[in-house]
Image (cartoon, grey):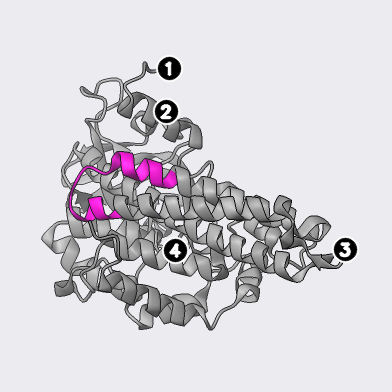
Amino acid sequence: MDFSLPESAQAVQRGIAGICSRYGMDYWERCETEKRWPEEVWAELAKGGWLGLAVPEEYGGAGQGLLELAVATETLSASGSAGGSAFTYVLTPGFGAMTLARHGTAAQKAELLPKLATGEIETCFALTEPDAGSNSLAISTFARQDGGEFVVNGQKIWITGVQRATWMLLVTRTIPAAEARPRANGMTVFLVNVPEAVAAGQLSYRPISKMGANTTPSNMVFIDELRVPAENVVGELHGGAVVLWDILNPERILLGASALGGAEVALRVGVNYAKEREVFGRPIGSNQAIAFPLAQVKAKIELARLMLYKAAWAFDNRLPCGTEANIAKLTASQAAWEAADAAFQTHGGMAYSLEYPVARLLTDARIGKIAPVTEELLLNYLATQVLGLPRSF
């Protein structure tokens, strides 16, 4: 077995790190405080072709896979962006480019993939609903067919990036959940032109006030008699569950990569402070009470990285990767939280000062334990689907 990264992924590391070297922690602090998208970094990523990593070469992309996207996300996050990087590679390269490359029609690919590769257009993903959070099969947003169109009504929540998106990947029911056999049947994914739908009064949104990750707003989305052409179905009518799993597994892997990078930067901040801060005439890092938690975090980061890369490799090779994706997301998010907590504790009272970045890192790390899926549901999947234990619901 060869555990070294392929040259394609190493090139991504070098390229993203080169861009990030021009943007320090202060830059990401300002983006978070000002609640603004990292336009400067986004522009450099687009100019360098880094947004088209997963777009096939015939559509102007690099023809790479999820592994390269995960490495890009991790590298960006580790540069200091932490949670601010999470949606940079999830919203458009992940949700948009990867999904259409696998499941789009020839016309959809020809129209959208070249523009996704350059960053000319952006995408978002709408699945979660107020009454159907992690129970995705229970969504009630419904699309009824009306000739050559579908008419959609419903509501979504925690939909990130609507403000910037040209296209939304909208998950609906075309067979009500109560009538679907099996339960995963009757789901359909649509491409929705966001500006057109908003202008027609068929789609609206309201930002949600958040405790962190404010570089990208998350929203309540309201869908009222939204008309979508039949040719905008992604994948097969009623067969959207297949598309959905190919969205959710990469989402977990990419957000795991963001968490992993966040763990790396938190560890770096904690270690640097432990070396520099002196109490009783010696660096506080010489005390095992400080050193051991940081060392434990290092071990957990390396273990999480192995599973993260394995999950991405399995997806790229079209192998089952649900278990690996869930474990990767679980362990990376746990490592991020423990790293941020250790860095916070290492700083002592100064951690509460916004002069240091640890408060932001702690807030960012907390997201991973609940989004896009809670830690408890990841564990439930492993308990029931992997270990064969009885279901609790």
Q: Spatial distance from mark 2 to mark 4, Cα to Cα?
A: 26 Å
**Residue position marked by numbered label 2 in the rendering:** 380
The correct choice, above or below, for 285 with respect to 231 in the image is: below
Type of the residue with mark 2: Asn
**Residue position marked by numbered label 3 in the rendering:** 280
**Residue position marked by numbered label 1 in the rendering:** 392
Q: Secondary structure at mark 2?
A: helix
Circle 1/circle 4 CB separation < 8 Å: no
- Magenta part of the protein: which range? 312-329
Q: N-terminal of the two: label 3 or label 2?
A: 3
The correct choice, above or below, for 305 with respect to 38 in the image is: above
Q: Secondary structure at mark 4?
A: helix
Q: Secondary structure at mark 1?
A: loop
Type of the residue with mark 3: Phe
Q: N-terminal of the two: label 3 or label 4?
A: 4
Left or right: residue 105 compared with residue 139? left
Q: Main secondary structure of the magenta part?
A: helix
Circle 2/circle 1 CB separation < 8 Å: yes
Please check the rendered image and state whether residue 271 is part of the magenta-colored stretch, yes or no.
no
Image coords of residue 337 (percent x, y): 59, 49
Please check the rendered image and state whether residue 322 is part of the magenta-colored stretch, yes or no.
yes
Count neighbours of disc 1 (C-alpha within 10 A) and say few if under 14, some if 14 to 19, many if 20 or more. Answer: few
Image coords of residue 352 (percent x, y): 79, 57
- What residue do we see at 46% from left, 34% from top? 133
- What residue do we see at 20% from left, 22% from top? 181
**Residue position marked by numbered label 4 in the rendering:** 74
Type of the residue with mark 4: Glu
Q: N-terminal of the two: label 2 or label 1?
A: 2
Count neighbours of disc 2 (C-alpha within 10 A) and say few if under 14, some if 14 to 19, many if 20 or more. Answer: some
Q: Quadrant of residue 63?
A: bottom left
